[in-house]
Image: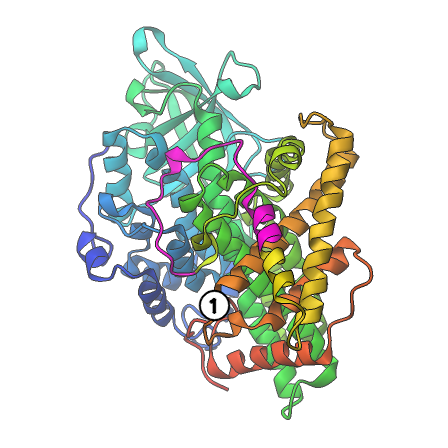
Amino acid sequence: MRQPTEARGTAGPASAAAEPDAHARADRLERMLGDPYDPAGPVGLRALLEAGRSGVRCAAGEAVLDDFGLGAEFVPRDRGGRLERADGLAAVLAAVFRRDLALGFGHGMTSLFAASPVWAAGTERQREAVAGLLLGGGRAAIVHHALAHGNSLLRGEVTATRRAAGRGFVLDGRKEAVMNADRAGMFTVYARAAAATQGPGGLSVLLLDRDTSDRDTSDRDGSARFTGRRPTDGLRGGYTGGLELLGRTVPEESLVGHEGQGMRLALQTFQLSRALIPAALVAGSDTVLRTAVAAAARQAPKGIGDRFGALLAGVFADLLFCDSLAQSALRALHLTPHSAHLTSATVKYLVPDLLRDGLEELAQILGTAGPDSELGAAQLRKLLRDAPAAGLGHAGTAACQAVLVPQLPGLAARSWFTAPEPPHALWTAGAGLPPLDLGGLAVAGGDDTMAAALVHAARRVRDRGATGPYGPVLSRLVTAFVAELGLLRDRLRFLAPDGRPVPPGPAVYSLTDRYVLVAAAGAALATWERRGGTDSFAAHPSWLVLALLRLARRLGLTGLPEPSPAVVERVGGEALARWRTGRSYDLRAAPLCVERP
């Protein structure tokens, strides 16, 4: 196994100690990447779109991320890196994802996904080797196990045959698409035992070093063949290549954790990816919304007005709503490790759909004439194409269903309306967090923190009474969502009186679709509550009211009003103000490197 390499550039321990605050690093990276709207900018939107169309990597963007030392963001601080908080990592990555999902995933996120099983269960030597690779500017790649209905990243599988007397494994198999296959220094391979059934105990994780696997040797050792980049566009353009293992032997020390532990490691570490991917999609949607606001404002210099005002306000409210969910899922990894699997699966299941619908609404503005619209429409098309690949498409959605569906009857029976209120830090930006321990994450059980947040926060809203201009509608909204949670509990009790899992089918899938909307309302409500007392727009109830009204419409809840002109004007006015002052369309409202209008 490769020994740690010397860290170079700004990626090493010294820089991590000098700049421990993730938001400060995020702002620095934002400045390094430059104005995305600069037509001559080497990491501008036009350059990134052209790289995507051509199926090549954006060399200028990769150079900036190398200079920044992005690999250190994926290495725990006790290993010489900068990774401490999952929400801090998301803040840094947002600067990249606001420009291009492909750059963020191709340059770094796949390395994080490959390293995560090693951080969770690897040996000391494995952790040192992966840390050295990433701190030195190298890449790691993940070779997924096959999933039904998967895209090319998931089709195909590697099998592992154990050799006698503890002499390691023989690997065989072919994967058509592995991100960074042509340049990864290490591969984290989810391999199935050759003689095993498809059960969870048949999957193991193996860490392969390219230096010992990237060569054809004798028939006894077999070979590993890397087939080069595939001519694809979008997220995988310029980043994916094929991998073929033909009787390749690997030593016993390549095993990560225990033999047969692969499925558990996947269920643990995928919780991090399920929380990070929604945050990435929020950041990518941020720039599309900004371009749409610019197009609308320049068509109506005296104000956006009724034509586009309600549309932009609604999409902006959805972005804030989705960001509240993503941030909650990221902090849950630290604060509620016993139930973070529920939070991350719920958020990953819902956020891509909400954002996709909002992006399609923005097409009404970006379909108009003008340079802003032309650029924005191209970026919108690319984001809509890249987002499913980032979330592993239908297979990723099905994996979230596989987490939620079996547990809903039990949650309805033992957790809903009885679970204690989750810790306030779960919904509070900047609150202290315990260390991130991927190996300590549970894969089943625990209380439903999002449903508990809805019940407890709704009670406080009702106790305060319908005061102020937003009080009556907010009180009606939270009452409606709590009532819907009660109806879901009754329906699940009918399907499973004893709280046991029910067989998958249309009925339970429909209830799952409704559940994620109701639970998400609880996370957003609790996030808004914890923002109280600050001067930020996130503490104002207007965005929450608008987002919940839009969510209620998706649920088909009746008896609720349409958004009032005051709500639309307040949220739309903030969207316009953030465009004019160059701040992000998320809860942080971060300063961006964009030219002021």
In the image, farthest residue toward the top = 165
Report the number of discs: 1
Region in magenta: 429-456
| Camera-side residue of 55 and 46 | 46
Does the magenta-highlighted stretch encompass residue 441?
Answer: yes
Does the magenta-highlighted stretch encompass residue 527?
Answer: no
Which secondary structure lies at badge 1? Answer: helix
Three-letter amino acid code at disc 1? Ala
| Camera-side residue of 328 and 43 | 328
In the image, farthest residue toward the right = 559
Decide if residue 96 is on the left or right side of residue 297: left
Q: Is residue 55 visible?
A: no
Most common SS among magenta residues = loop
Q: Residue at x 50, y 53 (%)?
A: 328
Give percent across and percent down for residue 392. 57, 43
- In terms of image quadrants, where is residue 120? top left
Q: Residue at x 37, y 16 (%)?
A: 169
